[in-house]
Amino acid sequence: MKYPLEEGVLLIQGNLSFLLIGKANEQFSLCIETSTEEFCQGVMPGDVIVVSAPEGGAVEPALMLMDLVRTWHVPLLVLPRNHPGSRRISRVVSVAKEVQTSCSITRGTHPEQHLVCSSDELAGIAIRGVSGGLELSGMPDGLTLRTIRYRIIVDRA
């Protein structure tokens, strides 16, 4: 399924959780920090940025997280497996050309950006940036999709 997305972000909502999906507007280097190393990956215009909220909640913090990555290129932090803080992370982010949702990974502990932790109801969705929008596959029934248009005024001077 192709979803047009010229501006803003796409909100995919289930009954208890949501995904917020945007596209990178510019090329940048995204640093990923683990407990033992730092590595950086190239992000290209059109790559997808996926914020997952496996337990739902307010959308506004997810919008802020999207903007921190998309506009300000804030590094992503990855916790070690079995870290006690993992259960308190309410929103996680992945950035890649294509991102797959999975409910079988522990949130905040997966440095590979092609996967993002999701709830059961949103698991198995593949999201890819394409010209003029997004390509979505593996979409379960009963989800709500809507575009959120927002604009954060940025003065980088």
Image (tube, helix red, strand yellow):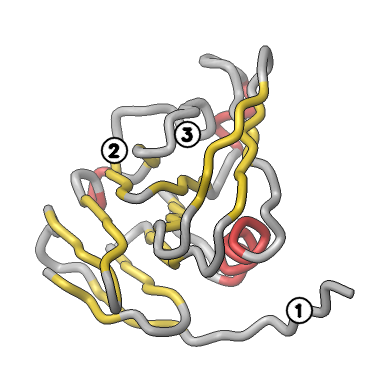
Q: Label 3, label 1: how many angstroms apart (C-alpha)? A: 30 Å
Q: Is residue 25 left or right of residue 100?
A: right
| Residue ID at (53%, 49%) | 91
Q: Label 2, label 3: how many angstroms apart (C-alpha)? A: 10 Å
- First reached walking from the N terminus: tag 2 or tag 3: 2
The image quarter containing residue 114 is top left
Amino acid type, label 1: Val
In this figure, what is the number of numbered marks? Answer: 3
| Residue ID at (89%, 75%) | 157
Answer few, some or many: residues within 10 Å of disc 3's Cα (few below 14, many 20 plus, some between 14 and 19).
Answer: many
Residue 145 percent across, percent down from the top left: 27, 76
Residue 105 percent across, percent down from the top left: 36, 28
Q: Secondary structure at mark 1?
A: loop
Label disc, if present, on residue 102 of the rendered structure = 2
Residue receiving disc 3: 107
- Position above or below: 77 against 120: above
Answer few, some or many: residues within 10 Å of disc 2's Cα (few below 14, many 20 plus, some between 14 and 19).
Answer: many
Q: Secondary structure at mark 2?
A: strand
Amino acid type, label 3: Arg
- First reached walking from the N terminus: tag 3 or tag 1: 3
Amino acid type, label 2: Ser
Q: Nearer the viewer, residue 79 or 67?
A: 67
